[in-house]
């Protein structure tokens, strides 16, 4: 009962529910490629954008700002991670 009370309090304080699933984590740790898809859901608000939920995401190499780092991105824009390669 106490947990339910804290949940109601948190919802009132934050003003929205939070999705702690994989999609919620990706939305809060996205890169600039996913910014448009996640607009309005950057804090993991539930339910997630339907267009975003239809996208296939993967974790891999992503070119940004003249360098390459690892991040989540859409399937066609993320490359294979290379063992031993230094990422920014």
Image (tube, helix red, strand yellow):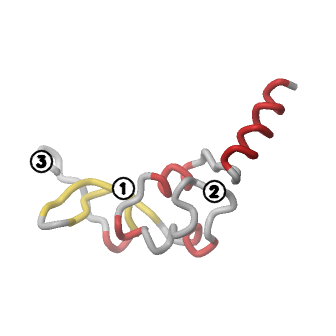
Please give the label number shown on residue 25: none
Query: What residue is disc 2 on?
Result: 45
Tell me: residue 4, above or below residue 82: above
Q: Residue at x 30, y 57 (%)?
A: 60
Q: Kindly report the distance in space between the C-alpha atoms of the residues bearing marks 2 and 3.
A: 34 Å
Q: In which image quadrant can residue 44 be found?
A: bottom right
User: Which quarter of the image is occupied by the N terminus?
Assistant: top right
Q: Residue at x 70, y 52 (%)?
A: 15
The earlier-in-sequence mark between 2 and 3 is 2
The earlier-in-sequence mark between 2 and 1 is 2
Q: Residue at x 63, y 56 (%)?
A: 45
Query: What residue is disc 3 on?
Result: 86
Query: What residue is disc 1 on?
Result: 59
Looking at the picture, tell me which residue is in the foreground, 60 or 64: 64
For the residue labelled by badge 1, is the local secondary structure a helix, a strand or a loop? strand
Tell me: residue 51, above or below residue 29: below
The answer to whether mark 2 and mark 1 are in CB contact below 8 A is: no
Q: Residue at x 38, y 58 (%)?
A: 72
Q: Position of residue 48 (x, y in %)?
A: 63, 63
**Left or right of 83 in this view: 16:** right
């Amino acid at each position: 009962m106490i947990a339910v009370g804290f949940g109601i309090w948190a919802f009132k304080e934050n003003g929205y529910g939070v999705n702690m699933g994989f999609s919620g984590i990706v939305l809060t740790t996205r890169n600039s490629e996913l910014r448009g898809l996640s607009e309005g859901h950057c804090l993991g608000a539930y339910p997630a954008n339907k267009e975003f939920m239809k996208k296939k995401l993967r974790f891999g190499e992503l070119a940004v700002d003249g360098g390459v780092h690892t991040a989540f991105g859409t399937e066609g824009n993320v490359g294979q991670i290379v063992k031993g390669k230094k990422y920014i």
